[in-house]
Amino acid sequence: MYSVHSQVRTATLAAAILLLVGSKPAPPQFQDAAPSADALIERFMTALEHKDATALHRLRVTEDEYLKIILPGSVEKGEALRKWPEQTCRYFWSEIDAKSLYTEEFLLGVFGGRTYQIKNVEYEKGTKEYASYTAYRQLRLTLVRDDGEERVLATGSIAELNGQFKFLSFKRD
């Protein structure tokens, strides 16, 4: 005969198994992402205005997000996610990260500390849907400085993942 404690434990275990079997894994998410491309661009412009390197850097995908979401999901929509060798993954991340870091310094040096109004937003290479995200490729902002001078800020691409937005990189192609 089973004790009450044993019956409760068995019922709890059975419920947990049913939940696990019947539930889908949570969709992947970015950390600290913006709810729209416009909101991300606004955060980007604020970070530049304040010459805030930390805030600017946080707008980009992290190494973990790149390696677990972006890189495997950079295949045609509907295709299986791609598994890359570890060494290849690290190489791709180190390349995109280093180039983005240099571009962050450039952007802060050229555009930082100034206030601009956004006149136009364009994605020079359009948008592309991949298996796990949508890329808004090669952001081009036409900016107007408070003295009326217009400038074009050319930077990298934005990734949208389940309604969340972050920069893939700041490097210009």
Image (cartoon, rainbow, N blue to C red):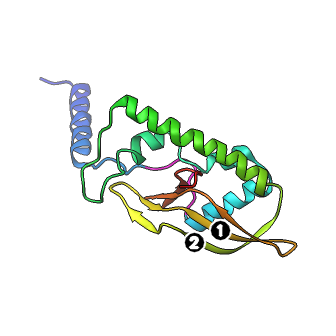
For mark 2, give the secondary structure: strand
Between 41 and 149, the residue placed more toward the observer is 149
The answer to whether residue 14 is left or right of residue 121 is left
Q: In the picture, which quadrant includes the N terminus? A: top left
Label 1: which residue? Answer: 141
Residue kind at label 1, given as amino acid type: Leu
Q: Which residue is mark 2?
A: 122
Q: Which residues are magenta?
A: 29-35
* N-terminal-most mark, 1 or 2: 2
> Which residue is rendered at x = 26% and y = 26% of the image?
5
Q: Please check the rendered image and state whether residue 121 is part of the magenta-colored stretch, yes or no.
A: no
Q: Position of residue 38 (x, y in %)?
A: 60, 68
Question: How many angstroms separate mark 1 from mark 2 (CA)?
Answer: 6 Å
Q: Are marks 1 and 2 in contact (CB under 8 Å)?
A: yes
Give the number of marks. Answer: 2
Query: Is residue 30 highlighted in magenta?
Result: yes
Q: Residue furthest front?
A: 173
Q: Is residue 62 found left or right of 1 in the rendered image?
A: right
Residue at the spot x=62%, y=64% of the render?
A: 39
Residue type of the residue flagged with mark 2 = Glu
Residue drawn at point x = 27 percent, y = 39 percent: 16
Q: Main secondary structure of the magenta part?
A: loop
